[in-house]
Image: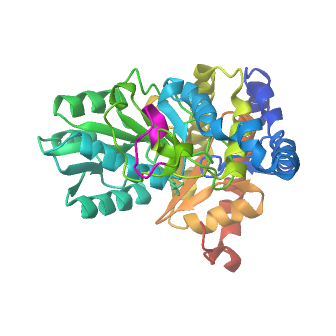
């Protein structure tokens, strides 16, 4: 019942956090896993950055406003969310570019091994970048699975790096990070984790799980804004030896010495390349305030509870309409999303979006609903499932305008 969901929201220890976001009236936003909502305080901070730090401070702001330290400062704040130390995380470039840099770094740390092992169905950019790295270095890209045992079985003495997404973007299935790290290390391989669908929504313990490298997006559950820069993690034990291939001046030991030769900065700083997109970076830094004081265990509990509720309501009310739950029913191995499959998935999602209920569609037939636990309410989940029922029951989805595919789904 709707009333039960209203009660769940009243009892929710995180319910006040929604106030930190500017979710538009009349919108139920279930796509924070693609583009996080706007934290309410960010526009004012951006105005200050543009008018004050850029407009008035001009070049002085690199020192006076601390722009030069923003990549490390912001990385340190993300570190808390992913179980790393401040010295192990920096914000730079995009996830795709960081994948390239760290895949090459990992292979170089493991000479004599020239296989990148990944999983069938990994996110496209992860697969494409790995293909590019393999081509460049004369390495081999091996895709196994998606089944976990098949991935483990493909770990042999030629694998230099095991590169996986922590959470499957289609289904939300969580790859067991600790188990895969242990198996990779036992086989002599390093690991590189893509945390795009984890950071800011589910628990990640990179250090405790002994991960070697990781990357992730700033604009999904971290709410940094469209095209926000990404983060990169390198475990402390690799800091002295890892070398990444884009040897730009921001990764130099002394960028302002203007030496002819590259000397990598010590530690995580050497992951940086060139001048960061400062407006986007400062928006991300500011957005991370939304996590201030947030208990990450409570965040994870809510993320699971929202997903569990959605699945229960789908089972109870959408039975006749031909949906299937494509995500794990066990919340322990499911990220902060639930995916449904339906042959008319694209049209159904378009009809939902027209009603202000925003999820997304992933070909061929997946409707994806993300539950950002900072701002999604239990009653939102109820209303979304109700609306799906109405759209199916009335045939609303079959109107011609819902059949047109736009460039971004
Ligand atoms: C969103 C996402 C990306 C995006 O990479 P960009 O370089 O920011 O475009 C990469 N990998 C995964 C797993 C993602 O979910």
Residue drawn where x is 55% and y is 46% of the image: 230
Q: Is residue 1 visible?
A: no
Of residue 192 and residue 406, the one placed in the foreground of this image is 192
Residue 45 versus residue 295 in the image, above or below: below
Report the magenta stretch's main SS. Answer: loop
Q: Quick check: is 383 in the magenta stretch?
A: no
Q: Nearer the viewer, residue 278 or 310?
A: 278
Q: Is residue 375 above or below residue 92?
A: above
Q: Quadrant of the C terminus?
A: bottom right
The x and y percentages for residue 332 are 46, 28
Q: How is the image coloured?
A: rainbow
Position in image of residue 131 (x %, y %): 30, 61
Question: Whole-percent x and y of residue 81?
Answer: 57, 28
Q: Is residue 80 above or below residue 333?
A: above
Residue drawn at x 18%, y 28% is: 186
Quadrant of residue 373 within the rendered picture: top right
Residue 262 located within the stretch drawn in magenta: yes
Judging depth in this view, the residue of 122 and 333 nearest the camera is 122
- For the record, the magenta segment spans 259-270
Relative side of 332 to 110, left or right: right
Q: Is residue 292 visible?
A: yes
Residue 219 point in image, percent of width and height: 63, 48
The image quadrant where one finds the N terminus is top right
The residue under the point 59% across, 24% down is 301
């Amino acid at each position: 019942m709707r009333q039960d969901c209203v009660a769940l929201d009243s009892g929710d220890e995180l319910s006040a956090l929604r106030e930190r976001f500017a979710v538009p009236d009349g919108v139920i936003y279930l796509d924070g896993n693609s583009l996080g909502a706007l934290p309410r305080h960010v526009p004012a901070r951006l105005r200050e950055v543009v008018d004050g730090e850029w407009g008035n401070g001009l070049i002085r702001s690199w020192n006076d406003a601390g722009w030069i330290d923003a990549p490390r400062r912001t990385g340190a704040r993300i570190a808390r969310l992913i179980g790393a130390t401040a010295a192990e995380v920096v914000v730079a470039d995009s996830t795709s570019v960081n994948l390239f840099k760290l895949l090459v770094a990992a292979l170089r740390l493991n000479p004599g091994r020239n296989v990148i092992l990944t999983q069938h169905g990994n996110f496209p950019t992860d697969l494409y970048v790995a293909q590019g790295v393999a081509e460049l270095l004369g390495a081999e890209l091996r895709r196994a699975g998606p089944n976990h045992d098949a991935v483990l079985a493909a770990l042999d003495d030629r694998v230099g790096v095991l590169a996986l997404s922590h959470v499957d973007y289609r289904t939300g299935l969580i790859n067991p990070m600790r188990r895969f790290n242990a198996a990779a290390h036992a086989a002599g391989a390093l690991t590189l984790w893509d945390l795009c669908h984890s950071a800011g929504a589910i628990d990640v313990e990179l250090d405790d799980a002994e991960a070697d490298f990781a990357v992730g997006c700033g604009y999904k559950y971290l709410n940094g804004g469209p095209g926000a820069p990404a983060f990169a993690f390198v475990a402390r034990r690799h800091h002295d030896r890892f070398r990444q291939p884009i040897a730009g001046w921001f990764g130099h030991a002394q960028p302002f010495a203007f030496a002819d030769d590259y000397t990598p900065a010590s530690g995580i700083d050497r992951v940086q390349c060139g001048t960061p997109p400062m407006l986007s970076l400062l928006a991300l830094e500011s957005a991370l305030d939304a996590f201030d004081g947030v208990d990450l265990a409570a965040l994870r509990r809510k993320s699971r509870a929202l997903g569990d509720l959605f699945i229960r309501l789908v089972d109870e009310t959408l039975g006749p309409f031909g949906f299937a739950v494509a995500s794990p029913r066990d919340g322990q191995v499911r990220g902060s999303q639930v995916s449904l499959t339906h042959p008319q998935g694209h049209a159904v999602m378009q009809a939902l979006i027209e009603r202000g209920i925003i999820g997304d569609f992933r070909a061929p037939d997946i409707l994806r609903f993300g539950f950002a636990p900072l701002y999604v309410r239990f009653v939102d989940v109820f209303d979304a499932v109700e609306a799906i029922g109405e759209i199916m029951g009335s045939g609303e989805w079959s109107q011609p305008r819902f059949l047109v595919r736009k460039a971004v789904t």
